[in-house]
Image (spheres, rainbow, N blue to C red):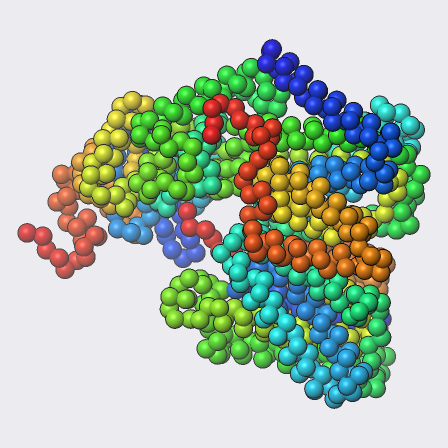
Amino acid sequence: MDYFVQQVINGLQLGFVYALIALGYTMVYGIVRLINFAHGDVFMVGAFIGLYTIERLQWPLAAVFVSAVVGCTVLAVLIEQLAYRPLRHAPKIASLITAIGVSLFLEYFTSLRQVFGPHFYSFPRPFPVVSWDWYGILVTNIQVVIFLVTTLCVLLLQFIVFRTKMGRAMRAVSFDYVTAGLMGVNVNMVISFTFGLGAALAGVGGVLYGIAYPQVNTFMGFMPGLKAFTAAVLGGIGNIPGAVLGALIMGQSETMVSAYLSSTYRDGIAFVILILVLLWKPTGILGTSRTEKV
Amino acid sequence: MMLEIRGLTKHFGGIRAVDGVDLHLGEGDLVGLIGPNGSGKTTVFNLVTGIYRPDAGSMALEGENLGGIPPHRINRLGIARTFQNIRLFRNLTVMDNVRIAHHSHLEYGPLAALCRTGRFYNGEKELHEKVESYLSIFSLQNRKYEMAGNLSYGDQRKLEIARALASEPRVLLLDEPAAGMNPYEVGMLMEFILSIRERFRISILLIEHQMRLVMGICERLAVMDFGQVIARGIPAEIRENREVIEAYLGEDISIE
Amino acid sequence: MVRLLRSLGKTFAAYALLAGSISFLAGAGFVNPYWVQIFMLACIVAISAQGLNIIYGYTGLFSLGHAAFYGIGAYTAAYLMKTYGGQSQAAFLAALLAGGGASAAVAYLIGLPTLRLTSDYLGIATLGFGIIMKVVFDNADSFLPELGGARGMTGIAKMTTIPWVIFFLLVSLLVVRNTIHSSYGRAILSVREDEIAAETMGIDTFQYKMVGFVTGCAFAGVAGGLYAHLYAFLHPSNFDFFKSIDILIIIVLGGLGNMSGTLVASFGWIFLLEGLRVFLPPGYVELRWVLIPVLLIVTMLLRPQGIFGAHEFPFLRGKVQDDA
């Protein structure tokens, strides 16, 4: 029983990190219907910024998070303006292929010997690890940090999206960007803001991931990115609570399979769940289908 | 009786889009379905063509029940339609749009197409000629290789009708065929509709807001409001009907 | 009948010319065997790409799991050939067809539930299926040891030759061309254009989606079988998500729904990859994967409809009547 609860907690840890990435995917998809393949790599950049600021610059944790947020946001907005915005009125597949191109570029450019190189780096611990024995179950301060920071971010996001003018603009643009524009919303700025917001969360996620699983390399964003995107679809793409729900499910199932079956199946199980869910609810658990008016 | 609709009902959430509608269409009839926006007319079309499933009621084509049958089979049974918001295959040519509708009457199989047999070439030739004849009714044959999306609005509407005809239906449902047309075009459309009824021996049910067309060519009318049929009769009667006037114009208007 | 025989004759002549000349060049030593192998790889990729072109370009189904079907065909053909076929050419043909058939069967099973999903959801479902298959390939040795699993499958005969590869490439092009330029092809296109309108015009859209999907996956299966017997070694990493993305990039670069574009882009992609590997100074070889994405991004920004757009080579236009 203890083992089970332990795995549940481990699963939560993974799920929370996935949630931070998944939110970026779901928001961007909601607003421009684009699967931003490069998002996982923005997450990777966040981890590397964390690596650099902790190890080289020896900055305090708060400053580390801030720099990851700033760095990732700038990167994402730059990508959006240079690579995606020009294709906004082109067929959607062109944007998708471009996103793939950006993702590949980020991965391979950073893996060049002259940059970071393709090898694994050891992510430094910014604070000593403390674990508490709670009735036979181990909870580390890392997990507590992850839970707290992620919850804070999600609450902040909810606040922005539902209680601010910008958030209202975001929701309007995701519903109908033409009309939103005609109503005076600066659509370009809202879209850039959305990309930036998603990237900020991914940046935080990158730092947290590095702290929790201290092996980073330039290709680390690919699989988590894929899983986080799957989580977003699982929960209903475009739906913010759905992304969190989906991510928690993904994290939990992956950990459980790894613990009880075999770690070689860990990547597969999440997708089996996804396919089953989609067959039952084609638009994701919390997703709403936009019925086409015939 | 060509098309028999009884007690047709469809809800969307709490809204009764179609509420116990009875309609009938005899052989060779030309019936108009009118009513204010949102009264459920297009929903009736969507139900008859199998796009929606009815919650209650029945629909029958020459006695054959249409309930639960998928749209492509309903078309093969003999019902074709046009759409309120034109749904042409915009990135395909005019020719292709019409040819596709004739697919269910194709004379050659996939193997013939793959091997390019004589049967295939003959089939394509016949198809080509047939489609040309449909297009020429609407004077569209000179535009046959243009992209459907590049045609003028009026031509697109005509193409939609030509396409529906190409599936060789017995019943044709026209959803606001005259929308956006000027008086001259409406006049031409009225003639088209009468002549295709004659030439192809089909029964036509049309939804329309342009009263000139409705009053001009429809033999009978059914008026819908809030999902129900509130009046039926010949155009002259409907024109004077109090409830119809109220439905369109509201209750405080009095007509001299 | 005469017409049919004439066109069959023309096709065979073209085949003989192509296969014969290239085989001669290779055999006589005019071309480095390394490049001959790359040429064959390009043909194989082109066959697989035509498959995805049918699925996505023509039928409009966003499938991100194409590499999985490539792999199913590869492992099926390799296993059958290794276990029963020996070195026989006839057995090879049977194994290839079996590989294609296996992919088609799996595609049918997967298609039944998933083809009803809308575009982006279909993409993610097929992506998921692709990843699941990779996991299956990785663990394949636990139910069939010969398949090798994560260690890779060895001991495959090098049966793939230029005549085989060109034969299947020509067949794939002919099948696509002849089908698309017929009423059946137009029916498939209508599914891509507007499903609801197509349904109301009598087209069974689900059936045609299935046909497009299964056929495209069958192409991938045959290509996979040819691939297995080209390098005589199979590893699950050859069939991962990146490979599915490669093929998607190829068909979009060439022009979606364009046979000529798919053909040219397949060759271009493979030769560019290999060319850069050879021509970049050693130590800078990793630069390939930095340059290629940049090229990709620039191409999409400048020509989002793909290099060929809607233009086809004359022999692929397949015009029937006096169509424009």
Residue at left 67%, top 72%? A202
| Total count of labels | 0
Q: Position of residue C90 (x, y in %)?
A: 84, 23
Q: Position of residue A172 (x, y in %)?
A: 45, 67
Outermost residue on the front side: it is C30
The answer to whether residue B153 shows anywhere in this view is yes
**Image quadrant where residue B30 sits:** top left
Residue B80 vertical position relative to residue C146 in the rendered view, above or below: above
**Image quadrant where residue C96 sits:** top right
Judged left or right of residue A189, residue C144 is: right
Q: Position of residue B2 (x, y in %)?
A: 34, 28
Judged left or right of residue C250, residue C88 is: right
Q: Position of residue A58 (x, y in %)?
A: 78, 87
Q: Nearer the viewer, residue B135 or A162?
A: B135
Q: Nearer the viewer, residue A72 or A134?
A: A72
**Image quadrant where residue A50 sits:** bottom right
Outermost residue on the bottom side: it is A60
Residue C147 vertical position relative to residue C302 in the rendered view, above or below: above
Residue at left 66%, top 77%? A71
The answer to whether residue A19 shows anywhere in this view is no
Residue at left 71%, top 65%? A106
Outermost residue on the left side: it is B256
